Amino acid sequence: MDEFKLPIDKEKFRLTNAPWNELKLNHPWSVGYVSMLIELKSFKNKEEWEAFYYEMGNYRLKKMKELNSTLKNILNDACLEIKYINKLPKNIIAINKQNGRTENQLLKKGEILHHFINKKHPNITLNECVEAVKFRVIGETWNGIILREHNTITTLKNELPNLNFIKKEGEFDYNYAIDYEISFNNKLLCGIQIKPKSYTYNTTYILKAKRTNYKKNRKYQNKYNVPFFDIISTTKGEIINLAVVNKIKKLL
């Protein structure tokens, strides 16, 4: 399968990383649990996944039409009113978290991003911000889950044929930064997260992401009393830090 290619300059894309997180545009409240959405069905190609994400965005709008104006305003994630989440019924929260967004809504997120960074980085255009948003939500999800994750798990299953790999989705993944749990004879051995080679770089953004994920991983370790590992791999599933595989074997 083909992967999504970054449509803008890499350095400009990097400069949008921090604002993207600071504005909480990456939050499931804002874009949905994309890792869950992409697992809902099989896609022949990346174009089908993109169309499905937008389709789920239209479904969300239909569900919102059934609500009163107050709830509609709260669910309007362009306002980024994430503080309301814990005060809402679960079925209302699900409208935002379990659905995608329309292409026009991603455009609006691009506008929010552009407005935020325009004074500091005037060379980054509105169109580039929109493309950055679409690539993060749709492209990176496809490249990371359908290509990297699936291919990496296939590699791990070949290396560790007696172990079970359980995909973790939605809120669990968001809370603990764990992509898969590995078990043997119904005994939980460890949790893993699958990352690209760029995750090994020590840029400001990556270091911040690592600290955030480490806190989530530690919370997982303390709750389930098992270790966690980062698996660094390519989109073809080639594992770069092979020493981790031996560490998992030693848990048996």
Image (spheres, rainbow, N blue to C red):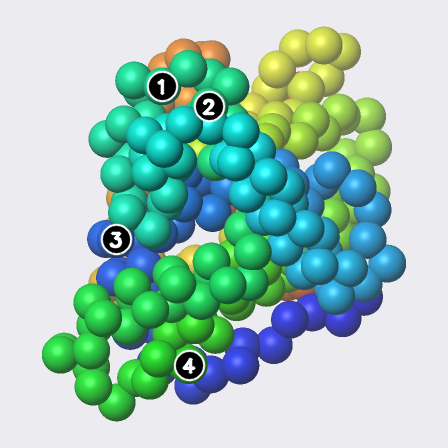
**Which tag, 3 or 2, sits closer to the chain's start?**
3
The quadrant of the rendering that contains the N terminus is bottom right
Visible in this render: residue 241?
Answer: no
Q: Label 1 to label 4, Cα distance in Å?
A: 34 Å
Which residue lies most toward the right here? 44
Visible in this render: residue 22?
Answer: yes
The residue pinned by badge 1 equals 88
Name the residue: 60% across, 29% down: 168
Q: Position of residue 22 (x, y in %)?
A: 23, 53
Camera-side mark, 3 or 2: 2
Q: Determine whether label 1 and label 2 are within 8 Å by CB.
A: yes
Q: Determine whether label 1 and label 4 are within 8 Å by CB.
A: no
In terms of secondary structure, where does tag 1 sit?
loop
- Is 44 left or right of 68, judged from the image as shown? right
Q: Residues within 10 Å of mark 2 (few under 14, many from 20)?
A: some
- Is 134 left or right of 168, judged from the image as shown? left
Q: Label 1 to label 2, Cα distance in Å?
A: 6 Å
In terms of secondary structure, where does tag 2 sit?
helix
Going by the numbered disc 1, the residue's amino acid type is Leu
Q: Determine whether label 3 and label 2 are within 8 Å by CB.
A: no
51 lies above or below 183: below
Going by the numbered disc 3, the residue's amino acid type is Leu
The residue pinned by badge 4 equals 127
92 lies above or below 233: above
Q: Residues within 10 Å of mark 3 (few under 14, many from 20)?
A: some
Going by the numbered disc 4, the residue's amino acid type is Asn
**Which tag, 3 or 1, sits closer to the chain's start?**
3
In terms of secondary structure, where does tag 4 sit?
helix
